């Protein structure tokens, strides 16, 4: 199988590329990335592998997408401009990348007759729906431009599947974390921000009172879901969206306390204002992914935090705090 990974130099994408190159069913892996939020350092270890190819390019350019899709069997589409705050500050760019860019990939796949596309969806699609745990067929109104873009991806996938006899699988990620997640910049995610602050013996900021909760999910679980989706032969599993999470609820304060313990520090967080567009609580029902894809998260939140903190400690060159 020849696989295209869009956004393959990013956090989730590069972890996925590593797993694909170790899979005997994969004959080659091509990465398409414009390096806007991804980094060459995430994939440079793969360059000597003759089965690996890197194409620097932007999914907003349709011709680039067509070239990247040439001679490809399946696509896993991870390229996106993440972050709810970023989308609130700059909705136009989020729309261009996440909607136009995704439509370009879907259309290029259609023209080149690539039947299956797996794509990164988002738990932000649940919006203001109050129910917990989140179930795939019960969503509310989106609370941010980012959430709108990810829901539109699902709508396009549904329409393309019906019109063009294609197979799409959407993976609604719930707060994926792990090695290679960028801790720098104004839109960094909470776990790398907390880890970096603790490693520098600085108190991190919690937005809100710390009671906001998320279904934090270690990146290996997201990688597993992608590979299952790329290779499933279950006809009922395609043209579906799935929650990809651990099915565990962790508050921001519990998250901070766990990382504080890993760091061996006793710092207290700084309490900041709640962020616009944030969902208060999030918890996934993962029974659909278990049943149709065979998805079983293999790394718990606690174990994932330990692995992740160890990676940040090593990457920052800190032997001890």
Image: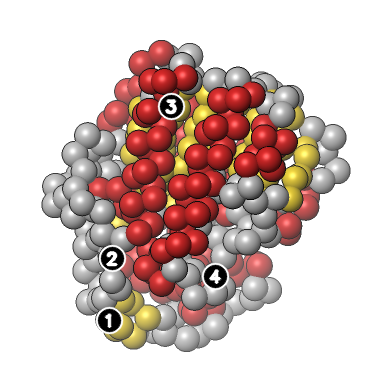
Nearer mark to the viewer, of 1 and 4: 1
Can residue 171 be seen in the rendering of this structure?
yes
Residue 303 vs 191, above or below: the answer is: above
Within-10-Å neighbours for mark 3: few <14, some 14–19, many 20+: some
Nearer mark to the viewer, of 2 and 1: 2
Q: CA distance from mark 1 to mark 3?
A: 41 Å
User: Percent x, y for residue 257?
Assistant: 34, 71
Within-10-Å neighbours for mark 2: few <14, some 14–19, many 20+: some
Residue highlighted by disc 2: 277
| Quadrant location of the N terminus in the rendered image | top right
Residue 131 vs 195, above or below: the answer is: above
Q: CA distance from mark 2 to mark 3?
A: 29 Å
Instruction: Decide which of tag 2 and tag 3 comes sooner along the chain.
Output: 3
**Front residue of 183 and 249:** 183
Q: Secondary structure at mark 2?
A: loop
The answer to whether mark 4 and mark 2 are in CB contact below 8 A is: no
Residue highlighted by disc 4: 183
Residue occupying image coordinates x 46% and y 16%: 165
Instruction: Decide which of tag 4 and tag 2 comes sooner along the chain.
Output: 4
Q: How many numbered markers are drawn?
A: 4
| Quadrant location of the C terminus in the rendered image | bottom right
Nearer mark to the viewer, of 1 and 3: 3
User: Percent x, y for residue 197?
Assistant: 49, 79
Q: CA distance from mark 4 to mark 3?
A: 36 Å
């Amino acid at each position: 199988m020849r696989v295209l990974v869009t956004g393959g130099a990013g956090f989730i994408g590069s972890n996925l590329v590593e797993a694909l190159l170790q899979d005997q069913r994969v004959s080659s892996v091509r990465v398409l990335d414009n390096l806007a939020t991804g980094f060459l350092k995430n994939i440079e270890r793969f360059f000597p592998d003759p089965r690996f190819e890197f194409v620097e390019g932007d999914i907003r350019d349709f011709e680039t997408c067509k070239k990247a899709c040439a001679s490809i069997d399946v696509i896993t589409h991870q390229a996106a401009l993440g972050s709810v705050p970023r989308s609130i500050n700059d909705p136009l760019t989020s729309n261009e990348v996440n909607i136009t860019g995704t439509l370009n990939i879907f259309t290029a796949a259609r023209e080149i007759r690539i039947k299956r596309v797996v794509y990164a969806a988002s738990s932000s699609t649940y919006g203001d729906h109050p129910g917990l745990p989140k179930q795939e067929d019960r969503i509310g109104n989106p609370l941010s431009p980012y959430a709108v873009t990810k829901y539109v991806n699902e709508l396009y996938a549904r329409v393309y599947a019906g019109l063009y006899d294609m197979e799409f699988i959407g993976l609604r990620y719930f707060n994926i974390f792990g090695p290679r997640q960028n801790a720098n910049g104004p839109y960094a995610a909470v776990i790398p921000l907390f880890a970096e602050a603790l490693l520098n013996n600085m108190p991190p900021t919690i937005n809100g009172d710390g009671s906001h909760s998320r279904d934090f999910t270690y990146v290996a679980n997201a990688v597993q879901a992608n590979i299952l989706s790329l290779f499933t032969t279950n006809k009922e599993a395609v043209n579906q969206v799935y929650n990809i999470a651990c099915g565990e609820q962790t508050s921001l304060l519990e998250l901070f306390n766990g990382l504080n313990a890993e760091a061996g520090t006793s710092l207290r967080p700084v309490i900041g204002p709640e962020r616009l567009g944030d969902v208060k609580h999030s918890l996934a029902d993962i029974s659909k992914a278990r049943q149709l894809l065979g998805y079983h998260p293999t790394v718990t939140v606690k174990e994932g935090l330990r692995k992740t903190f160890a990676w940040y400690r090593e990457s920052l060159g800190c032997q001890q705090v």
